[in-house]
Image: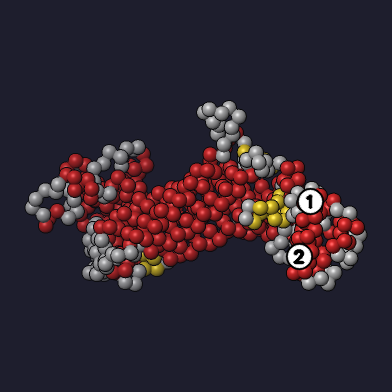
């Protein structure tokens, strides 16, 4: 049977021919062919289940498994093995090839299963593998952030709230903030993987199978932790796709925030970072430009992934039990989500490896703009001044310094005392950049000692992983 004459898996009920435009509209092989490998893996496990159930003889099982393995080899060695094929979907493609190879024996393979539980199994197998790859990419991103932090552990940058300079922090502290976000992203993916690692095969179309297939054995062969407990739910469940898209959206949200920081800090106005030529582009008109296109694309692609999450939710929200053809729309959204997150993580990691810090510029920024005002208020609190009163007093000092066009450190002791007689000559030491950082010494703070501990802990954690 050739590709051009291969039949659908459901033609016996129909006497007329399908309209060609409907056939094209109905076909999913153009995108679900990427499930080919997992479809064959699932078919091998199903074949073994049929042998154990005495539906197939051992000899028949060996012939089918041999042919399925040959299909995998052909896909790996023949570049256009899948591209040149004409089929309704990946399942009909595999069955047509099997019939070509082993004749009517190939038609026995579908005994006891439906495309409904078959595609649900394929998607779980495929996504499980992709989650493992994404976790590895997140690990690489975390490691790169940690390397960048350790290489610049003494660099100080201004921390921001409302995009206004707020308090100085160590650059390593900034890196560790994103490392924490990515750590939670890895945990979320692990949770998704745990819930998707349930075998739906054996649920058939919707009511379960009539054959005595040992589903637990099939599950163990495919590496699933358990089998689904309700056949209606199993064939119509796409919760795992939606949950993954949600976790993927969180990853992209974090990458978008990282991208925004890198874009801002690379501007002339900030001047904290310089991107190497390897991860920047120029302008077709303006010769002086060096643009952070890579991170702008990451920031932009976040919306793409958010859209896929909304698409999946909308597709599933009104579907009656059990399977409906609407669910064919899950694949392109899922596939593109995986592709986009993988590409974005890879590029973000490359960019992080190609950042050079301007330490003198960041230090200057961290010591300009009254970033030690909170420290001065805390100084007064240590002198037994209520915080709200101290806050008000320091606010007036800042106004005075603004009028004088100087920093708080530049005020004289007499000027300080004019606002509060409790201020002594130790005030300037308390307002130094080093003191401002050192006092943030509680767990999670930016004090150099705490950041050093956090770096060591992060390295130990990544090494354990």
Q: Residue furthest left?
A: 15
Along the line of sight, the residue nearer the viewer: 119 or 334: 334
Q: Earlier in the sequence, mark 1 or mark 2?
A: 2
Along the line of sight, the residue nearer the viewer: 129 or 423: 423
**Label of residue 392 in the image:** 2
Along the line of sight, the residue nearer the viewer: 219 or 353: 353
Q: Position of residue 163 (x, y in %)?
A: 63, 52
**Label of residue 124 in the image:** none
**Label of residue 403 in the image:** 1
Query: Within 10 angstroms of label 2, few (less than 14), some, or many (20 or more) residues?
Result: few
Q: Which of pointers 1 and 2 indicates the residue nearer the eye? A: 1
| Observer able to see residue 51 | no
Query: How many marks can you see?
Result: 2
- Residue plotted at (27% across, 38% down): 84
| Observer able to see residue 171 | yes
Q: Residue furthest front?
A: 403
Residue 254 in the figure: left or right of residue 165: left
User: Which element carries disc 1, helix, strand or loop?
Assistant: helix
Spatial CA distance of label 1 from label 2 is 17 Å
Residue 274 in the figure: left or right of residue 431: left
């Amino acid at each position: 049977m050739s590709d051009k004459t291969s039949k659908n898996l459901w033609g016996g009920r129909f006497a007329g021919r399908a309209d060609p435009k409907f056939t094209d509209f109905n076909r999913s092989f153009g995108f679900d062919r990427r499930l080919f490998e997992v479809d064959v893996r699932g078919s091998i496990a199903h074949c073994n289940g049929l042998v154990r159930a005495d539906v197939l003889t051992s000899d028949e099982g060996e012939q089918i498994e041999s042919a399925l393995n040959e299909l995998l080899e052909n896909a790996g060695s023949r570049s256009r093995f899948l591209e040149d094929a004409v089929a309704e979907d990946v399942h009909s493609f595999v069955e047509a090839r099997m019939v070509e190879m082993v004749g009517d024996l190939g038609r026995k393979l579908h005994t006891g299963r439906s495309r409904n539980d078959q595609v649900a199994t394929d998607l779980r197998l495929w996504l499980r593998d992709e989650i493992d790859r994404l976790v590895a990419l997140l690990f690489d991103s975390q490691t790169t952030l940690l390397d960048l932090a350790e290489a610049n552990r003494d660099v100080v940058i201004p921390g921001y709230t409302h995009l206004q300079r707020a308090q100085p922090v160590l650059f390593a502290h900034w890196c560790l903030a994103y490392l924490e976000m990515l750590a939670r992203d890895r945990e979320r993916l692990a949770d998704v993987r745990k819930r998707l690692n349930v075998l739906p095969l054996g649920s058939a179309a919707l009511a379960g199978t009539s054959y005595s297939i040992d589903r637990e054995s099939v599950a163990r062969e495919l590496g699933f932790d358990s089998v689904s407990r309700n056949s209606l739910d199993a064939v119509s469940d796409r919760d795992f796709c939606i949950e993954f898209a949600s976790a993927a959206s969180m990853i992209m949200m974090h990458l978008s925030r990282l991208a925004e920081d890198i874009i801002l800090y690379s501007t002339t106005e900030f001047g904290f970072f310089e991107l190497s030529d390897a991860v920047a582009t120029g302008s077709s008109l303006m010769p002086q430009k060096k643009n952070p296109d890579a991170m702008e694309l990451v920031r932009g692609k976040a919306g793409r992934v958010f859209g896929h999450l909304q698409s999946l939710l909308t597709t599933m929200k009104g579907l009656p039990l059990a399977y409906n053809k609407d669910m064919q729309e899950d694949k392109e959204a899922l596939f593109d989500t995986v592709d986009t997150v993988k590409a974005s993580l890879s590029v973000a990691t490359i960019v992080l490896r190609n950042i050079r810090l301007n330490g003198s510029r960041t230090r200057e920024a961290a010591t300009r703009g009254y970033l030690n005002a909170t420290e001065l208020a805390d100084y007064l609190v240590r002198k037994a001044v209520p915080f709200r009163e101290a806050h008000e007093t320091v606010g007036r000092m800042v106004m005075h310094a603004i009028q004088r066009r100087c920093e708080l450190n530049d005020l004289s002791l007499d000027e300080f005392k004019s606002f509060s007689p409790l201020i002594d000559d130790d005030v300037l030491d308390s307002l130094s950049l080093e003191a401002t950082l050192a006092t943030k010494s509680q767990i999670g703070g930016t004090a150099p000692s705490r950041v050093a501990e956090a770096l060591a802990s992060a390295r130990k954690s990544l090494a354990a992983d």
